[in-house]
Image (tube, rainbow, N blue to C red):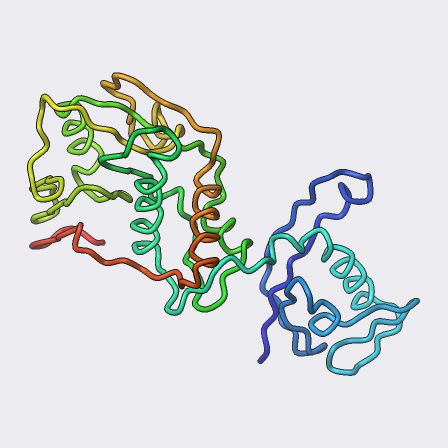
Amino acid sequence: MKKLIVLAALLAPLLCGAQQVEWSRTRMDGSRTGCSAPGADNVVESLGSVRGRRYFAPDGKIYRGGTVTATAVEVLAAQPAMADVKTPVGFCPEGMNRRDLYDFATDILMDVSYGLFGKGADIAILNSGGIRADMPKGEVLKDDMLAIFPFHNKVVLVQLKGQDLLATVERVFGRRPQPFSGVELTYRDGALASVTMKGKEIDPEATYYLCTVDFLLGGGDRMRLATGAQDIKYSELDVIDVVLEHMAREKAAGRNIEAVRDGRLTMEGEGLER
């Protein structure tokens, strides 16, 4: 049975002249009409058209009035407002699960920290709850990325002494891993057993830079990543902003979006799931 992803708009703000429209994604059965999920440039082919009181469905059926036509009117009216989120932003040959996305997102934070703050990050940490969906296989739309990174959390850089960074890592990652980049973690029998940075121990007296988001500085997910901070630099960009900028660069260079599995996380024994 053919399935259709319909993006149903809440049209009241649009009808009142508001600039922003909210919508939600609902999986629906398109077998009656032959509809398929529309992109930005194939609305009529995917959803059909309405002329007067008649709805011309993609499978050739014609509906005169009724709930099918009324629904078609609302869905078609919403499409112009949603054109931007249907923009292709990359191609992911294999797709990415949540674990791959943890590495993907934190690697991007490491890469952008110097450009944002004038300091390269030594480590990046996010929270698993901030990444809410898998990346689909094949063409990736802006809407897919907004579903993966739905929260407006600003990228920040925290300066920490080595002893405070190590204490933070041991506290935050003590029983289970969160998204991270820049260090190597080994868990043994369900507990954090070792932390290294580029194969070496963290120097308690050295200065390190942690790239994260403002939500996690205080009470967000109880991480308290600002504990012991010597300095904090704030950017105006959300995580989704830097992720989309990264994907735009990769797309312009003709590169696909692929998972990087580099062995940063090692699990030994029993008692811990990835």
- Residue 116 to residue 246: above or below: above
- Residue 134 to residue 46: above or below: above
> Is 60 left or right of 256, judged from the image as shown?
right
User: Where residue 147 appears, x then y in whole percent?
Assistant: 50, 51
> Is 7 left or right of 156, judged from the image as shown?
right
Taking the spot 25% from the left edge, 16% from the top edge, the residue there is 230
Taking the spot 82% from the left edge, 62% from the top edge, the residue there is 70
Q: Quadrant of the N terminus?
A: bottom right
Q: Nearer the viewer, residue 140 or 174?
A: 140
Q: Quadrant of residue 116?
A: top left
Extreme residue toward the bottom, this view: 60
> Is 83 left or right of 206, judged from the image as shown?
right
User: Where residue 216 appears, x then y in whole percent?
Assistant: 35, 30
Extreme residue toward the front, this view: 253
- Residue 174 to residue 134: above or below: above
Q: Quadrant of residue 212?
A: top left
Taking the spot 43% from the left edge, 46% from the top edge, the residue there is 243
Q: Nearer the viewer, residue 12 or 150?
A: 150
